[in-house]
Image: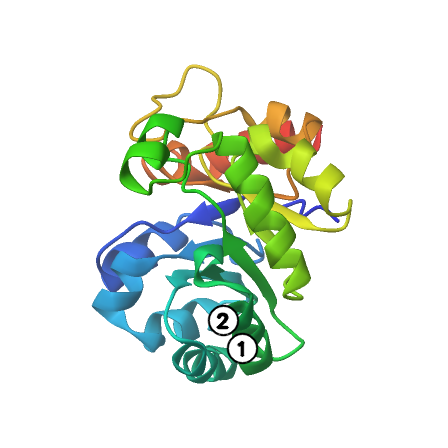
Amino acid sequence: MREERPVIALDFPSFEEVKAFLAKFPTDESLYVKIGMELYYAQGPEIVKYVKSLGHSVFLDLKLHDIPNTVYSAMKVLADLGVDMTNVHAAGGVEMMQAARQGLGPGPKLIAVTQLTSTSEEQMQEDQNIQTSLQASVLHYAKKTQEAGLDGVVCSAKEAQAIHEATSEAFICLTPGIRPAGAAVGDQKRVVTPGQARHIGSSYIVVGRPITQAPDPYQAYLAIKEEWNR
């Protein structure tokens, strides 16, 4: 399964900036947007309700990681907001992920973070004391995520093909760190273009600054969407 719309990361701190940004798109253009920690913690559930009221799909990127009962209760709250997708950290374990699935219910997609795309293999080994390769860690987390009954994972596009081989073709690989050719990499360490992401098996792509900071965000979005679906 592949989502044809690039997911736009709404990495803004205020309600006003989100409104101004979304106003640059035609009202009949149904978008898929990511609301992350900064925006959600600043504005709360109302930002999700507002974006949903415009007819857009919402990936609420909060990366929950806590004891199973707490994650279960939090997911029940997020389900009531009508989110289309949300996530947890796979490092929380199978029991926690199963509790998340139960709390969220069967409707929204639920995925898990394997290793952040800002994490290098050296950092993983030094900071997390995981003494395997980065890919081995990612594949282990992906298989545990599938075991827990979740829909997929957040991963680098460079890992998508191996994850599909280790799980299934239907298993979602949502990939941040997408940059058009020639765009600034920023703080991402494992990046690919939209076309490369499609070729190597991404199911969803998340794009932030190349769209949100573009002189004409709508045209930037259309160009990335075209490359993603070419």
Q: Position of residue 149 (x, y in %)?
A: 67, 66
Q: Secondary structure at mark 2?
A: helix
Q: Nearer the viewer, residue 227 or 123?
A: 123
**Label 2 near label 1: C-beta < 8 Å?**
yes
Q: Nearer the viewer, residue 77 or 90?
A: 90
Quadrant hosting residue 195 = top right
Residue at (52, 74) in percent of width and height: 100
Vertical order, 185 against 12 (above or below): above
Quadrant of the rendering where the C terminus is positioned: top right
Q: Amino acid at mark 2?
A: Met
Residue at (61, 56) in percent of width and height: 144
Q: How crowded is the residue under tag 2: few (<14 C-alpha within 10 Å), some, or many (20+)?
A: many
Q: Position of residue 225 (x, y in %)?
A: 60, 36
Residue at (71, 46) in percent of width and height: 2
Q: How crowded is the residue under tag 1: few (<14 C-alpha within 10 Å), some, or many (20+)?
A: many
Residue at (48, 17) in percent of width and height: 181
- The type of colouring in the image is rainbow
Counting labels gives 2
Image-based side of 203 in relation to 118, left or right: right
Q: Amino acid at mark 1?
A: Ala
Quadrant hosting residue 205 = top right
- Marks 1 and 2, how far apart in space? 5 Å
Q: Is residue 15 something that shows in the picture?
A: yes
Image-based side of 32 in relation to 172, left or right: left
Vertical order, 101 against 201 (above or below): below
Label of residue 99 in the image: 1
Q: Secondary structure at mark 1?
A: helix
Label of residue 229 in the image: none
Label of residue 96 in the image: 2
Q: Position of residue 23 (x, y in %)?
A: 39, 54
Q: Is residue 205 something that shows in the picture?
A: no
